[in-house]
Image (tube, rainbow, N blue to C red):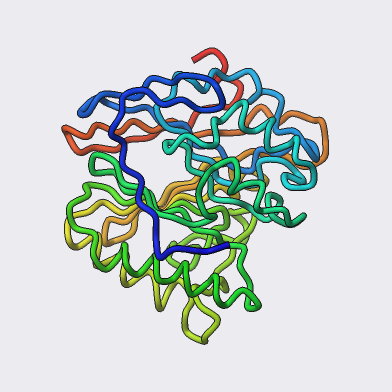
Amino acid sequence: MLYKKYRTVFRFTFLLIVSGCVYETPLPGETQTIIFLGHTYQKRDRMDRRLEKVNYKKYDQIWLGGDMCSETTEEYSTLKYLDNHFRLGDPRTHWAVGNHDVRNGNTNWITEYTGRDLFYASSDQGLTVLVLNTNFEDPDCGLLEAQYNLMTTVLDTLQTSSHLVVLTHHCIWGDAVAGQDMWMTANGNKPFWRSLCTEGSEFMPDILPRLKAVQARGVQVICLAGDFGQRVKAFEYRSAEGIWFLGSGLNKGLSNEIDPDDQAMILTFDPVQKSLEWEFVAVTELASR
């Protein structure tokens, strides 16, 4: 697959046709409601059954934090199942893939349904979302370099957006959180993640200074990870520079047991007031909201 330096999605229409359905898009300036879900799998080809009852059409954007099913790319039908719920080809649906999403290969099925690479940038009315694939390893040096070029291009030039959301599956920013043992917090703390195959390219020495520079330029930076839920259901931390580090997820494995404390996030973006607010919501409440 050919990976471009980055791909930015702008919305020009007020109706979007996805998989044969028509979805209304918010008018410019309208407040948008966003749902974020992470670590949702319950079975090899199914997510938590409570999430199947949620009406996702009422959300203007859907952000997915990865590990949607236990073996997301084992069967092609699993992608169709997820698409039926999350309209994967909608440019307002953002998916940061997890290890359970890609470990069976067949990642071309994901890109086929989404119409995008596994890492990209999207900007709409001042809200920029940078979606990263944190599953690349050293043998994927070319892909890491392409993703790095995307990151540095966005982070080094972003000025006009009011918010930047860095969407990942793994918690690659755990060492930036003071006073919290992220090994006992996130499902998959990954401070050893590299943005390149070379030494010194970890999040702390290489990416965090760039995020601080974006924050200093007046853009609110938010790092949001979906690999949570097995230890802590909802997490938020604000650094001294004002950067937010957030996470939420479900405590699921191959068990059919339901954890009533599982959390999702509902975010509200107001492009006029340039505000992005969020709340953690029990998964058991989503279907009735």
Query: Which residue is outermost to the top?
Result: 288
Rendered image quadrant of residue 154? bottom left
Farthest residue toward the right?
255
Q: Position of residue 93 (x, y in %)?
A: 47, 37
From what the image shows, is residue 121 above or below residue 142? above
In this rendering, the answer to whether 174 lies above or below 273 is: below
Q: Residue at x 51, y 37 (%)?
A: 89
Q: Residue at x 67, y 46 (%)?
A: 230
| Horizontal side, residue 75 vs residue 59: left or right | right
Q: Position of residue 128 (x, y in %)?
A: 32, 48
Instruction: In this rendered view, identify the residue nearer to me: 103 or 222.
Output: 103
- Residue situated in front as seen by the camera: 152 or 255: 152
Task: Return the x and y of residue 206 as percentages of the image width and height.
Answer: 40, 76
Seen from the viewer's position, the closer of residues 116 and 255 is 116
* Residue at (30% x, 33% y) in the render: 269
Q: Quadrant of residue 135?
A: bottom right
Quadrant occupied by the N terminus = bottom right
Question: What number of labels is visible?
Answer: 0
The spot of residue 100 in percent (x, y) is 71, 51
Q: Is residue 28 above or below residue 65?
A: above
Q: Quadrant of residue 77?
A: top right
Q: Is residue 68 left or right of residue 6?
A: right
